[in-house]
Image (cartoon, helix red, strand yellow):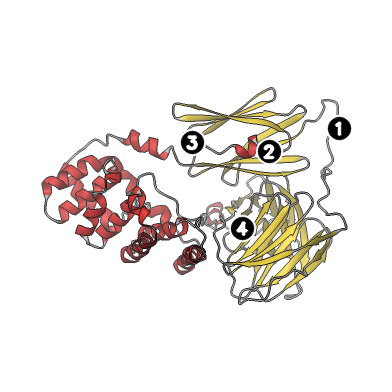
Amino acid sequence: MRWPKPLRWIAVTAALAVGSVAPAGLGAWAAAAAKEPLEVRVGQSQNLSHIEFRWNGGVRYKAGRDGQTVTLHFERLADPDLSLLRVDPPAFLQTAELHKSAGAIDVVLTLKPGADAKTGQADGAVYVNLFPAKPADAPAPAADAPRLDPRPAGGVVRMKGEIASGQILLHFPWRNPLGAAAFQRGDAVWLVFDTPIKLDLGASPPQTPIFKGIKAVYGEGFSAVRIVAPGGPAIRAWADGATWTLAIGPGLQPWATSIKTERDNASPLGALKAQLAGATKVVWIDDPAVGDRIGAVTALAPSKGLSSRRGFVDFNLLASAQGLAFEPVAEDITVNFDTDFVRISRPKGLTLSSAAAVTGRVDPSLAMPQPAAMPALIDYANWSRTGSGGFMARYSDLQNAAAAEINKEADGDKQAGVKARMALARFLAGSELSYEAIGVLNLTAKTHPEMLSDPEFRGIRGAVRAMARRYKEAENDFSSPALASDAASALWRGYIAAQQNDWTAAKDGFTHGMPAMNQFAA
């Protein structure tokens, strides 16, 4: 385990100043961590409603069924927003309730008559699939169950394009939900739908440096668009009801959930499987620019993708914002899927490295760095992650998001907030770039003086000021009443006092901050 430089010094000095101090107060930290949010996501088609419960961190859970009631017991506290399930319940769900107990919550789902449910874990979330119950004497349903026709009246989907804060937004309104895949290949961005239909692209936005044109592509069982987007800009894709939107360029939309890929141990031959809940179709596309054939697996919302390209001997997985896409190297690649998994194989097996090596290809999620459990706790391990693109790509993306937030504010958007700027500051602090983090935070305070009362703002700025040896400035932040009871802030106060040879104050700070000591490990 590696400790960042300031915390290595803290660990040694704390041991010398305090001696063996029992880490009392860890219960308070656990209570704070338990308040991390639980996000609820919903995707649906005619015969399936997919409900995800996504925690910011791991969670132990149990699922139980009593008649038409499904209960999910999570061993962490949270106050999730269940309005999606209560105000406009998805198909097959009647209502949802939340019950809290000591250190745990129960989400109780009441199914409509004639509905059935399946629970499990996939894509890093706990999920519940709701679908029509099969009568005891009914035959097994066909593999391709009928669904509501997603094609609008008239048989044409008319795209609506716009440019917002420099970001290209392409909206495709369908009549009912359907599966899609969005991915990048070279200087092209693809958006593929699992239903063949004519696409009217007449409302395309004007060309920009990252948008040089769009063309419809049709094939067996699908319709798609191919966009020329030089430079490999960031892309995101999401569905709002039956409307799919593709965004090209930096923006504030959340990243897709990372798809997990691993060796398929159930296969006697070499095979790979990927968790992709809600997969709907495998399609094969003739790429007009390259002249070869690529594959894509479409899926229902919410969005799930791969943060970067991944190479294997027999095929390559492409970076995607939704679904899966791959370039076959071998000619006999086969792709199959069920409700939760996509399996890639060859008749004689794939050529794969060890299971550990394949698993190691998976990038961490590149969502914006989130607040730590304590205001002055620097989450070095998570905040500094860059993914396979490296430091500069990650830094550039977070900078672009912060710039877009500032531009929205300059345009008079009073709801722009400071979410992206704080995410950039966390990344810089976690990367031990103290002076850069100070600059971002000071600039934020100039336009948002209310942040000076925010515990996390004062905690992070105090920490990076201490890293930069600006001890008087750091003391000013840590003297904020908002940080009076924060154990992580007490550690930093002890660190500053030790640097100034005030060993009495150092011992006091380390003693009160000891509950936070182990949380700084990276």
Name the residue at 27% across, 45% down.
Answer: 481
In the picture, residue 308 is in which quadrant?
bottom right
Amino acid of disc 1: Pro
Q: CA distance from mark 1 to mark 2?
A: 32 Å
For the residues marked 2 and 4, what is the alpha-carbon distance in whole angstroms? Answer: 46 Å
Q: 10 Å neighbourhood of mark 4: few (<14), some, or many (≥20)?
A: some
4 vs 3, front mark: 3
As measured in the structure, the alpha-carbon distance from the residue carrying label 4 to the one carrying label 3 is: 41 Å
Q: Which residue is mark 1?
A: 139
In the rendered view, tell whether residue 397 sits above or below residue 260: below
Can you give x and y, in whole percent of width and height, for residue 217 in the image? Answer: 79, 68
Residue designated by label 4: 352
User: Label 3 is placed on what type of residue?
Assistant: Ala
Q: Which mark is residue 88?
A: 2
Q: Position of residue 190 (x, y in %)?
A: 70, 66
Pick whichever, 43 or 138, lies toward us. Answer: 43
